[in-house]
Amino acid sequence: MRRVSRFAFFLGVALCAAPGLAFAKDSVTIGMVLEPPGLDPTSAPAAAIGEVTHYNIFEGLTKINEDFSVTPLLAEKWDFSPDLKTLTFTLKPNVKFQDDEPFSSKDVKYSFERFAAKDSTNKDKGFFASIDSIETPDPMTVVLKFKDPSFEALFHLGMDTAVILDEKSAAGEATSPVGTGPYKLSSWTKGSSLTLDKWDGFRDAAKIPLTRATFRFISDPSAAVAAMLAGDVDAFPRFANVEALGQFKSDPRFQVLVGGTEGKTILAMNNKKKPLDDLKVRQAIAYAIDRKAIIDGAMDGLGTPIGSHLTPNDPGYIDLTGMYPHDPEKAKALLKEAGVTTPLELSLILPPPPYARQSGEIIAAELAEVGINAKIQDVEWAQWLSGVYKDKNYDLTIISHVEPLDIGIYANPNYYYQYDSQAFRDIYAKIVSAPNLDAYKAALGEAQKKLAEDSVNAFLFQLPNVTVADAKLKGLWKNAPIFVNDISAMSWQ
């Protein structure tokens, strides 16, 4: 008996070691540059929250797909009124939250009213405030009535800001998230990694291939390359070290995907801080910037120049990159007209992503050529969120806004740019109340031109979506209309 047992043991080891006979891999490790500050995407602005939780822990009524299409998720179907002001959803039956609470129309009503509330910190609060009333005639029906026609409603409802919460657990979502999705939080080692485990109570659990997903937070570009080469990370969406792509492209163990995103990468300016409150000073900064040099130097040539706050993917996009060509002499003249004594001292605060740090070095050199001394301050993500985004304590910063169709942020004078323009708010009112698609696109064009004319920010480039991954991992997105890692769609070949 002892010899039989020993033989069986060694046979098992041999089978596991033999090529082609190993057990199928049922987990994945995903690399991320930034660690989320919390896990509630409905109350904090960091895109990293959605990268971990959206579609995995939390779900919304609709789902935005890689090709920008919108399909049902917690909704089974919907119906729009001809005037685009009433949207009726039929909800998916037999859905539960991860605490076994049933999902129904009351959860939708609770969530959307919470997101629109006066004390809400939802970054898409303006959209939820545009809902005039929410009716729940039965547990599986929700009727949204908008104040104006809402072309973007289905898209907004597919974003991580619109995921549905359970009232019982809503207050604790940042640390103990409870959603309707296929994965639950297993562990979170701050500063290192976060693990999700497949939830057996999910309505379609049998269709989910992977039982575990671990997110590793690696902000250093060289460390990201090393982790991929060592096999410590299976996939790295939003891969930051673009200079290293050549070695992955030439290695058959890996796949490299390069697509587009909704990321508008900008040199943001504090419009209420002197002398940046002067249009001529902001215009001088725009003329000092050489977009091609930034894209070539910081992004290894990957990225499309933009001239306002939309990407070429968006409806109504217009190319305004010719409004501020690289012209250092024009920049110097405008500073002189504004009465600025050079060198002008400004802070340039840079968060961790390499696109920001590397672009910042180039921009600081370009600004120095026209008499602006941009003093670089590298900060961690939490510092950027508190100091720049929340407290508005900055002159210049570089960031990529990855939320789709988010031009409405400029209608909020308390947003961290502190851009206060009634003329822009009037244009934005035309966007949200457009009676048809042509009027909607026309109003978007007006809005883009107004932001460029006011030189609110220096608009740099569309952020590319670069992913490096194990060649056998399937289900990764090439294009990223939103920043998510849809683990349920991933599998091993």
Image (tube, rainbow, N blue to C red):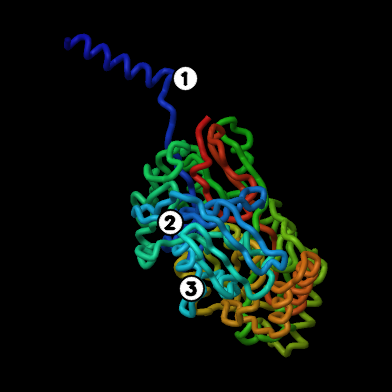
Q: Is residue 287 left or right of residue 395?
A: right
Residue shown at the point (59%, 56%) measured from the top left: 482
Q: Is residue 423 left or right of residue 190?
A: right
Are there few (<14), some (14-19), or many (20+) residues within 10 Å of tag 1?
Answer: few
Q: Is residue 211 left or right of residue 314?
A: left
Q: Please, what is the three-letter code of the amino acid marked with disc 2?
A: Phe
Q: Name which of mark 1 and mark 3 comes first in the sequence.
A: 1
Residue shown at the point (77%, 77%) measured from the top left: 453
Question: Which numbered mark, 2 or 1, is in the foreground of this view?
Answer: 2
Measure the C-alpha gap from mark 2 to mark 3: 24 Å
Q: Residue furthest right?
A: 322
Measure the C-alpha gap from mark 1 to mark 3: 51 Å
Measure the C-alpha gap from mark 2 to mark 1: 43 Å
Q: Please, what is the three-letter code of the amino acid marked with disc 3?
A: Thr
In the displayed structure, would residue 225 be above or below residue 430? Answer: above
Which residue, given by chain and number where applicable, does mark 3 sit on? 121
The quarter holding residue 471 reads top right
Which residue, given by chain and number where applicable, does mark 2 sit on? 103
Residue 108 at x, y = what percent? 48, 63
Residue shown at the point (70%, 61%) measured from the top left: 461
Are there few (<14), some (14-19), or many (20+) residues within 10 Å of tag 3?
Answer: some
Pointers 1 and 3 in contact (C-beta within 8 Å): no
Q: Is residue 482 visible?
A: yes
Q: Nearer the viewer, residue 458 or 313?
A: 313
Q: Nearer the viewer, residue 6 or 89?
A: 89
**Does dot 3 land on a helix, a strand or a loop?**
loop
Which residue, given by chain and number where applicable, does mark 1 sit on? 20
- In which quadrant will I find the N terminus? top left
